Amino acid sequence: MALIVQKYGGTSVGTIERIKAVADRVVDTAKNGDQVVVVVSAMSGETDKLIGLAQKISASPNEREMDMLLSSGERVTSALTAMAVEALGYRARSMTGRQAGIITDTVHTKARIERISGERIRKALHEGYVVVIAGFQGVTEGETDVTTLGRGGSDLSAVAVAAAINADICEIYTDVDGVYTTDPNIVPEARKLRKISYEEMLELASLGAKVLQTRSVEFAMKYNVPVVVRSSFNNNPGTLVVQEEKDMENVVVSGVAYDKNQAKITIVDVPDKPGIAAKLFDVIASSNIVVDMIVQNVSSDGKSADISFTVPKTDSKRAVEVTGKIAAELGAKRVDLREDISKVSIVGVGMRTHSGVASKMFQTLASHGINIVMISTSEIKVSCVIDLKFTELAVRVLHAAFGLAEAAGV
Amino acid sequence: MALIVQKYGGTSVGTIERIKAVADRVVDTAKNGDQVVVVVSAMSGETDKLIGLAQKISASPNEREMDMLLSSGERVTSALTAMAVEALGYRARSMTGRQAGIITDTVHTKARIERISGERIRKALHEGYVVVIAGFQGVTEGETDVTTLGRGGSDLSAVAVAAAINADICEIYTDVDGVYTTDPNIVPEARKLRKISYEEMLELASLGAKVLQTRSVEFAMKYNVPVVVRSSFNNNPGTLVVQEEKDMENVVVSGVAYDKNQAKITIVDVPDKPGIAAKLFDVIASSNIVVDMIVQNVSSDGKSADISFTVPKTDSKRAVEVTGKIAAELGAKRVDLREDISKVSIVGVGMRTHSGVASKMFQTLASHGINIVMISTSEIKVSCVIDLKFTELAVRVLHAAFGLAEAAGV
C-alpha cells in the first residue's frame, strides 16, 4: 500500500465533466489499495475572474482581502471533487489549507509555507477517507488569516503536503505529458524525459518551462519528495523528478529552455569606482525588481565601464526609471533599454563532468549567424541572451547539436 | 457613538456597482462616528449556481461538502465589500464565520448557532476597522468544519452578531422598503409599518412574508435586538422590529399574510380510538415533514373521525404516501389530498385585548362568498384555509375590513 499525493491543475478540473474524470482516476488509485491525498487548483479561469472583480473595485486592492477572495476558488473545487469521489461510492473529505494544517508566514498573496501539521490529513486517511485539499492556500500562525502562495502555488501545496505526510510520491497532473527536452511547439522532435534531477528541473522551471512552479521544485529537492509530472487526459507515464542519480551524468544536456520575457538595460560609461555596482543593484532590489543576468565591461582605458543587466520585460519601464536616477548620481553617460532580446539556455547535470559544453553552444549559435549579447553560466546551465527574432532558430539548432531528439541523428 | 450591524442581502450586493453603493452607505454611517459591522450574503444567483454545479455531480451531495462549497459565495462578497470600503479611504477587514467566532452545532446545511465569541470583531472595531462578515456560515466547536445556517441564514448571522457584541441596532437591508400590512402586489393600498413587535413579525415571517428569516426573528426576540428592515436602494426609514410596546395593542390587526404553498390531507373514517392522532403524527414527523394545521372531527355516531392536516405543497406526495400506510394500519377508509388551497391569516398583538376579531374575519370572508376549509388560531393570529382561487380576494377584503390601508376608508 502506497501513500500518494495527486495534484490536479485548473485545466484538469475546468468543468464538471473533468472533475468527474479526476474522481475516476482517484478512485482507480484507491482501488489499488493506495491511500490518496488530492490537491486541487481553482477551475480554470476562476481565479482570473475573481481578480477581475477586485480590479473593478480598486486598482490596488488590500492584499489580505485578495487572499480571502482568491482562496474561495480552490474551496469550490475541493468540495466538488470530494462530492464526485463520493458519487463513485468512496468516502472523501475536502479540506481547506487551514484544515489541512498548512501554516504560512503573513506575507499575503505570496506567503511562504512555514510548516504543515498534517495531523488531520493522517487521521482522515486512517479513517478511510480520500482527502481533497484546496491548493494555493494556507493560514497564518494561530489560524488567524487566510493566505495564498502565489501563482502556481497549488504545486507547492502538493509537494509540501507530500513531504509532511511522508508520501511515497507526489503526482502533478497537468495538460501536458511531462517535461520535454524543449518546447515541442518549436521543435516537433522534442522528446519527453523519463527522468530528470531536481537541479535540472529547477533550472528549467526558472527558465520559463511552466510545467512546475519553481518553489515547489525547491521544496521537493529540500525534502527529497519524488515528483511525477504527467497528463490528466491520458495514461502516459510522465516524467519523474528525483534526486540526481549516477547515470544522469552520462547525459550532458537534458534540455533547451528559452525565455522571451527579458529586457536588457545598459548603463553606459559609468566612472569605474569601487561600490558602484553594489549601489546600483541595491536601489533596484529595493524597488522589488528581480535582476537576472549581470555583465560589466571595463573600457580599454580602465576609467569607465558599461554595466548591463536583464530584468523581466514587464518590469522594464520601472527599471529604466529607477536606473536613470541612480545613473545620473553616478555620473554615467546614459541608460539604454533593449526589449528585442530573449534568453536561450541549455541545462544538464552532466556539464559538471563534461568539458566543452559552453563552447559547443557558442559555436553552434555562431555557425547559424546568431550573435550572443550576454552570457551567464552556472554549474549545470549555460544561458545566452540573443536577438529575439532568432529564438526559435537557436532552440532548434541547439536541440539538434546536443542530440536531444527522439530518434538519434534527427 | 452607536454600534451598528448592517446586513446586505444578495440583491444588494448583486453587482460590483451595488457593492460600491453598499460601501458608500457603510462609509456614510462610519462618518457619523458610528462603529459598523457589515454582514453580507452571496452575490445574487451565486448560491444557486454552486448548487447547480453540485447537482451535476450528485443527486444527494454530501452535506459537509455542500457547506464547504456554498460558504465560498459569502467569502467572495465579504472580501469585495471590504475592498470597496478601503477604496473609499476607510479601513475594513473581512471575516469568515469562523474568524468572527460564530460557533454552530454540526448539523450541516442547517446548523444552529451555539455561541458567538465576538472577541475578534470587538478588537477590530476598537482598532478602527469596519468589519465585514461573511453571512450564512459558521464553524463547528474546535473550529473543525465549516457549516451553513440554511436559506436566509445571513439574517440570522447579522442578528446573532448584533446580540453578541451588544449592538445598538441591527439593520437588515433588502430590496423592499420594509414590512407591509400585506403584499403590495395584491393590495396597492398596503401600508408600510413603522413599527412591529417581534411576535407579530414572527407570525408574518412564518406565514410566508419573506422579508426576514423566521429564526433570525426568534433570535432577535430572545436577545432583545432591535431590528430595522429597510431598502438598500433608497433612504426611506424602513420598519422597526422591537419588543411589544404599550401602544401596539391599540392596533388590533397589523397585517394580512397568505401562503399558497399548502396542501391538505384528510384521513377519512378513522375508528375513533385513543392514541390514533399521536401514532399518525409521530410517523409523519419522523419522515421530516412539517405539519402546520390539524383538525379532527368526530362523526355524529361517535364511532369514527376525519383527521385533516396541512403540509407544504412540496412535501404533499411524500406525506400522502406515509399517511396511506399508517391509515391502512389504523383501519381508515381512505386518504384524500387537496392541493388547490391556500392559507390566509391576520396577525396582531391587539387581538389579545380585543374580542370579536376572529368572527369579524369569518364574517368578512363569508360575505364575499369565500368558504372556510380549516381554521387555526393563536394568541395573536387567526388563520383560515380557503380555496386557492380566492386568495387574492380574501387578502383584499380582510385588508379593507380591518382598516389597514394607507388612507382611512380606502
Image (cartoon, coloured by chain):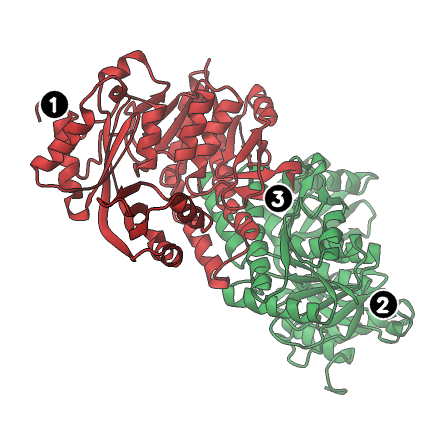
Chain colours: A green, B red
Q: Secondary structure at mark 3?
A: loop
Pointer 2 indicates a residue of which chain?
A: A
Query: x, y (%) of residue A84?
Result: 56, 63
Q: Secondary structure at mark 1?
A: loop
Question: With respect to residue A226, does A363 lie above or below?
Answer: below
Q: Which residue is mark 2?
A: A349
Q: Which mark is residue B145?
A: 3
- Whether discs 1 and 2 lie on one chain: the answer is no
Q: Secondary structure at mark 2?
A: helix
In this orientation, which residue lies closer to the viewer: A24 or B91?
A24
Q: What's the residue type where badge 3 is placed?
A: Asp
Question: With respect to residue A7, does B361 lie above or below?
Answer: above
The picture quadrant where one finds residue A132 is: bottom right
Q: Which residue is mark 1?
A: B407
Q: Measure how far apart labels 3 and 2 are at the Cα level.
A: 47 Å
Q: At 61% across and 24% down in the image, what residue appears?
A: B119
Q: Measure how far apart labels 1 and 3 are at the Cα level.
A: 53 Å
The answer to whether residue B383 is visible is: yes
